[in-house]
Amino acid sequence: MSWSKLKQNLESFLAPALQGKVEYRATSYRYAPDKSGNCYITVDKKNILNMKDTTTPIRWYQTEQEIKNNPNIDVPLTAADIEAVREGGNSNIPEERLQVIARNRKLSECAKDILAAQTALSKSNFDTVANRFLARPIEESLDSPDIMLNILALVDRRVGKKRLQNMSDTVKLKHPAVQYFYELRRRTF
């Protein structure tokens, strides 16, 4: 599918409040066949999602430790998480320490997931991901570990207010790019 047709299809699925606000853009190099070009997403004419641009407001992590030290990542703990730590360790571990250990374990899992998704995004081809998004049900794109599929699904008109409210806990565990577009969409309601 040509870029203009793909862009038209993607923008036809944008939520009404985001039309004209969110745009898909691409650059290509006519005389450099080895350069694939660059696709990026803009919000209010500002470049928001572009892996090659360090001036974007979305944070791209370099290490797992960087994610663990980020105070903005909130990891919800369940009683099952704390119980798993209790069963794995000694019985004389204080309750506060059990919570710290469980949070660190969950944060470690979250950090690995975020780095894996970020790595997949940097290697992926926007056209391929966009075509996959257009061919799949919206639920699959929302549940996918792929950052770009999540973003395309969040700005989609088929995702309503109730579904966005139900996603609030799961979005906290996703990449900052996904969180940015979640907040952008949530503010439109």
Image (tube, helix red, strand yellow):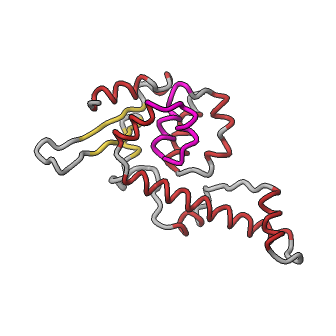
Residue 63, how many percent across, how many down?
A: 49, 67
**In the rendered image, which quarter contains the N terminus?**
top left
**In the rendered image, which quarter contains the C terminus?**
top right
54 horizontally vs 153: left or right: left
Residue 158, how many percent across, how many down?
A: 55, 25
Residue at 61% from the left image edge and 26% from the top image edge: 160
Q: Determine whether 92 is above or below 41 in the image.
A: below
Magenta includes 151? yes
Residue 84, how many percent across, how many down?
A: 79, 64
Residue at 17% from the left image edge and 51% from the top image edge: 34
Residue at 75% from the left image edge and 68% from the top image edge: 100
Magenta includes 124? no
Q: Quadrant of residue 3?
A: top left
Hey, which residue is sitting farthest left in the picture? 31
Q: Determine whether 131 is above or below 54 in the image.
A: above
7 horizontally vs 86: left or right: left
- Main SS, magenta region, reads helix
Q: How many marks?
A: 0
In this view, the residue in front, 139 or 26, is 139
123 horizontally vs 62: left or right: left
Residue at 42% from the left image edge and 29% from the top image edge: 21
Question: What stretch of residues is rendered in magenta?
Answer: 135-158
Residue 71, how many percent across, how many down?
A: 62, 60
78 horizontally vs 41: left or right: right
